[in-house]
Image (cartoon, rainbow, N blue to C red):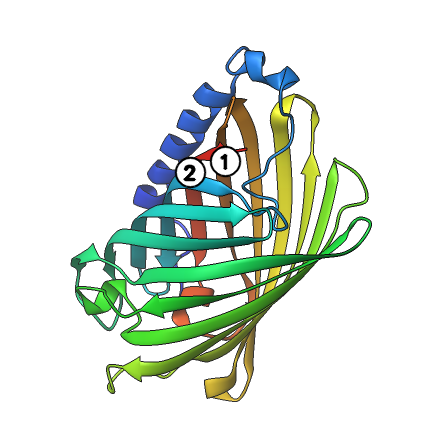
Amino acid sequence: MKFKLFNKQSIGKLVKMLSFFVVLTGPGFGDEHTHTHQVTLGSDPSEIVTRLEFRNEYLGLPEDGYLNSAIFRGDYAFNEFWLVRAEIPVAAGETHEYSSDVGLGDVTLGTRGKLDLAEHWSLVFGTDFIINTATGDAIGTGKDQFVPYAVGVWKPDEKWVLGMHYWYYDSFSGDADRENISESLIRSTTLYNFPHGYWFVLDPRIYINHEQNNETAFYLEGEFGKVIYKHYELWLRGGGHVTGEGREERLGWKAEIGIRYIWH
């Protein structure tokens, strides 16, 4: 399978996203906030917070396919140990199997909890339900999915956050003509908070496709962000497939920009 990693259109999208990010995080923007809260809460996997979030996520897929999603996310935290959340994507996409589609993608509903195990250690656990709401084949999986997960987090100080994740994706209903999903995700996240509200995340991932003889794909992502003003956080994330085989969306590349409002 040939995969064209970049083309003129994708490079143009990346340049626009990077330019927008640089303008909003440049010198002087949000300086008033650097003395009130200097670490990210939204990108810390151990934080249970109420948020409103918008991000645009572009996936470059094999054989010139793509999926571009504008995703609206809302989390409501009942306290510091439990929340519920929803994600609603509006997407446009095309694959080598399905022609171009535009419309609603697969909606995600979920809940998350946290246990403080010891000083600097916590366990985060939850369940997502990915609902087969996509209005076109190219912008959804065609399957309802049950996604339990657990994350062990170590925070030795305010600057460092280290997490080890296990997620399991399992389809239980949907279009009989679409491939069933049984996939494990193992990922480690390393978050470092720089001075003045900047942060960086390194996020290597291993996907294991149990439906296809445990095909394994290694995927690497990175994120750079800034707390820009009071409760607002802005970030840029990107990455792509490094090696191995797996589901089509694990074999491409990703570019993402987002902004969130955090209540704290």
Give the residue pinned by disc 1: 235
Quadrant of the rendered structure where residue 39 is?
top right
Give the residue pinned by disc 2: 258
Is mark 2 in CB contact (under 8 Å) with mark 1? yes
Residue 204 visible in the current orientation: yes
Q: Position of residue 5 (x, y in %)?
A: 42, 55
Q: Which residue is rendered at x = 51% and y = 75% of the image?
A: 245
Q: Nearer the viewer, residue 187 or 2?
A: 187
Q: Position of residue 58 (x, y in %)?
A: 36, 49
Residue at the limit of the structure toward the front, as seen here? 78
Q: Which residue is rendered at x = 49% and y = 53% of the image?
A: 83
Q: Which residue is rendered at x = 25% and y = 87% of the image?
A: 176
Q: Position of residue 65 (x, y in %)?
A: 30, 61
Disc 2, SS:
strand
Quadrant of the rendering where the N terminus is positioned: bottom left
Residue 108 is left or right of residue 33, and the answer is left
Disc 1, SS:
strand
Amino acid type at circle 1 is Trp
Q: CA distance from mark 2 to mark 1?
A: 5 Å
Please tell me whether residue 13 is drawn above or below residue 210 in the rendered image: above
Please tell me whether residue 38 is drawn above or below residue 102 in the rendered image: above
Please tell me whether residue 215 is drawn above or below residue 248 in the rendered image: below
Amino acid type at circle 2 is Gly
